Image (spheres, helix red, strand yellow):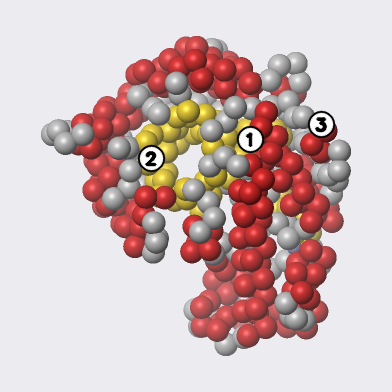
Amino acid sequence: MIHTTMWTYPWDVLDEGVDRVLDFLAEEVGLDAISLSTVYHTYDQLRTHLPGKKLFSGYEDAIYFQPQSELYQGTKLKPHVHPMAKGLDPLRIIADACRRRGLELISWTVPLHNHYMARQHPDCALLGAFGDRYPGCLCPANPEVREYVRALSVDLAINHDVQMIEYESLHYMGFGMFRNHAKVGVELGAVGSLLMSLCFCVGCRQRAANRGVDAAELKDQVEKWLLDLFEEGPPVHSVEEFVAAEPLLGEYVQMRADAVTSLAAEVKEAVKIPVSFLYMGNYYNNGIDRKAIEQIVDWVNVLCYSGSPAEASQRAQETLADMADPSMLVCGLNGHRPIASAEQMRDIIAAVYEAGARRFSYYNYGMISRRNLRWIAAAIAAVRTRDAGGVP
Ligand SMILES: [Zn+2]
């Protein structure tokens, strides 16, 4: 049995017409669910099939529903509600329309990649080895951040009729999540990226101290490594070799992974509905310990974006090979470029299906053309036929 969803923006649904869009996605594209952005970062979006004007910008990271304020009475961070959600509640309107159609509603939730909150509360942002606050990156070890993410998650789960919460950015954001044009003129390599990604905020230092790890000693060493790397370039060692040779660094990296894993466990415990974790990044830059995360959440989403069926399939196979429970996998598939034909769209999902994936998430309704939406519909129909034992 396969399961299909599509990442979808609430502004596209509202502006094109709730009934029109959801009827199309449910009946013509044949989706089981939509993954609706409810907590989202900034964007400038070209909307090719919206009548009239085509460009839409979200200038601040925001939520797209009306929060239950009591849930945030004790939190330092407060939800920043997008103006479109102040007079009406997009999530409630769309949830009602999904329920009427039997369409599952997934909350696509981006909690920690947030420039607005990191600017409002710099003490909650990642703090690099040189003392820089990283824009757009809330630290998952910060207790105030964790409290906010829990409240936000509970709000979504109990008040908004979503059947699953999918988290994107429930981890360290790494180095380089810039909003402006990035000006980085040195090669960092994998080791430099790891060292620049390390956070030495109060929350991280406290977690390190709890494990008997001297964060101050490590921070001094990281500064030296980085200053040397800026001059001489990255070391020849792989990041795995580098970390294995430095026990203090290895402990700190493990501390970060535990901060992420425990946050996933806390939200899973709090929401009491299925949870999906979107993998972006890796253990060394982002603190994602896949095996530990997969012990906690219900689904994990891996982006298999490619124009090549073989390449998409390879990504799915590599992921599945490391999973204790392969049925947890959701494959993210691109509906946008470089897909250039109906056959290509069909062959990619077929290849990923052959690799063992049964859940698929397409990117993304408002961005792609009507033509590509029709190709997705045909690709889904073909893989359903194959799944039912017929000839696609
Ligand atoms: Zn931190």
Rendering coords of residue 370 (x, y %): 39, 21
Circles 2 and 1, Cβ within 8 Å, touching? The answer is no
Q: Which residue is mark 3?
A: 69
Residue 113 in view of the camera: no
Residue type beneath disc 3: Ser
Residue at 73%, 66% in the rendered image: 199
Q: Which residue is mark 2?
A: 360
Q: Nearer the viewer, mark 2 or mark 1?
A: 1
- CB of residue at label 2: within 8 Å of ligand 1? no
Circles 2 and 3, Cβ within 8 Å, touching? The answer is no
The crowd level at tag 1 (other Cα within 10 Å; few <14, some 14-19, many 20+) is many
Q: Quadrant of residue 182?
A: bottom right
Give the SS element for disc 2: strand
Residue at 29%, 41% in the rendered image: 349
Label 2 to label 3: alpha-carbon separation: 34 Å
Q: Identify the image quadrant of the N terminus.
A: top left
Q: Which residue is mark 1?
A: 157
Circles 3 and 1, Cβ within 8 Å, touching? The answer is no
Residue at 45%, 24% in the rendered image: 103
Rendering coords of residue 99 (x, y %): 51, 20
In the image: residue 55, left or right of residue 214: left
